[in-house]
Image (tube, helix red, strand yellow):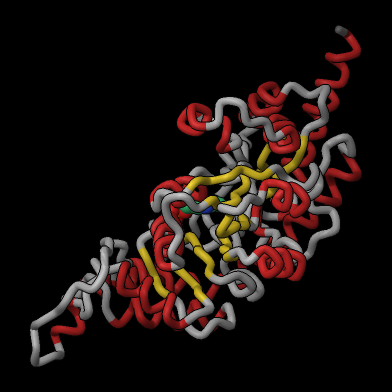
Amino acid sequence: MLLVSAPIVGSEEKAVLAEVIDSGWLTMGDRVRAFEEAFATMHGAEDAVAVSSCTAALHLILQALGLGRGDEVLVPSLTFVATANAVCYVGATPVFVDIESMDVPLMSLTEAEARCTSRTKAVILVHFAGYLPDREAWRAFARRRGLLLIEDAAHAPGLKEAGTFGDAAAFSFYGNKNMTTAEGGAVLARDRTVRETIRRARAHGMTTTTHQRLDSRTPQYDVTMLGFNYRMDELRAAIGLVQLKQLQSWNGIRLALTSSYRRLIAQDCPSVQVPFSGYHLSTYHIMPVLLPAFVNRQNAIDYLRAAGVQTTIHYPPVHLLSLYRQLYPNLHLPRTEIFAERELTLPLHPRISTSMVEAIAARLAEVVREEANRGVAA
Ligand SMILES: *Cc1c(COP(=O)(O)O)cnc(C)c1O
């Protein structure tokens, strides 16, 4: 089965894991620090804080920026549930905003303006599929409204422009992302004080870490804030350091495969729409397409599966998930809902070859043709 995404790990990752085990020190230490420095450098940031997941990163960012009860945070609904959950963790209220269009399935700026109230304090932008929004327009909006600008950059590691235009950004290194540490995440934050708050809150709010106390004469520590255990460990950091070396070339392969998909779909099944037609700043994290209305999506999924091609859906809109449906029973986001009903995610990762893309596009064209004929017959 050709999978939608696959982690690329091998002998080098195995070797560094063995090194960590032989070193006798498994938890947060020098490798985590080295990984933070390497990740920050790649994004042209001053520093980074490595954490246990992107979800933890979002939680830490919202807490460090002082968001809490009574505050409203603008979020897209076309995202993974963690984006909205993190807002709830700090007691703030997620306010869901529709996407711009079928071609640009990123948060609509016009709609964001319309949803602002006196309680709106922040906006979380999600770089859906790896594509960056209009950075200047969002910065101007945040400035004008006095809002904090947060990036959920889970889909965008390795793109220099990602994670550095807002106040803070959260990255994911989960197994299906552009690079992986199995579980893992990172924070970039423009302000040094915010970064240091996050660094401390990641480890229970303690003034020193276990590793620092190894080399210190004083085993004492203090706790200065309510913190969490959101640490990364040396095993994950070691994998991350190996992965980082390949990330740019992997993102390059993703770009090339996306271009092939675009060309073949336009040629062989032009009724299938490929979003982000005019966008070039991307990590090409996933390959979303929109099926024409005459195609029954389940039939397409079954047809492709039978041909050995896995597909998925990005995303079931968060406001329609049972948990959020209860909280927002009457919320309707028409463009997000239509997009989510028609969307299909095709396999895209660096282990896929151009000829596999050709085969997948051919199978997609077949099922679209079959569905068109079925429509005519009926
Ligand atoms: C994967 C993902 C997350 C959560 O990342 P974890 O590292 O698994 O916590 C958050 N937001 C988006 C948009 C994601 O795709």
Does residue 332 sit above or below 270 in this rendering?
Answer: above
Q: Is residue 220 left or right of residue 288?
A: left
Q: Horizontally, is 131 left or right of 191 in the view?
A: right
Query: Residue 289 in the image: x percent, y percent?
Result: 75, 41
| Point 80% across, 60% down: residue | 279
Residue at the spot 72% in from the left edge and 52% down from the top edge: 113
- Nearer-the-camera pick, 259 or 337: 337
Q: Nearer the viewer, residue 2 or 194?
A: 194
Q: In the image, is residue 12 above or below residue 91?
A: below
Residue furthest front as drawn: 118
Front residue of 267/51: it is: 51
The image quadrant that residue 44 belongs to is bottom right
Q: Is residue 352 visible?
A: no
Residue at 59% across / 49% down in the picture? Answer: 75
Is residue 163 left or right of 66 when viewed as pictured? right
Q: Find residue 222 and report its image quarter.
A: bottom left
> In the figure, is residue 196 to the left or right of 26?
right
Q: Position of residue 284 (x, y in %)?
A: 68, 58
- All told, the count of numbered labels is 0
Q: Vertically, is 167 above or below 218?
A: above
Judged from this view, the residue extending furthest toward the top is 378
Which residue lies at the image location 20% right of the left edge and 84% below the top edge?
212
Snapshot quadrant of residue 146: bottom right
**Residue 48, how many percent across, how many down?**
45, 77
Q: Can residue 203 be seen here?
A: yes
Residue 274 coordinates in the image, percent (x, y): 80, 45
> Which of the image's four quarters has the C terminus?
top right
Rendered-image quadrant of the N terminus: top right
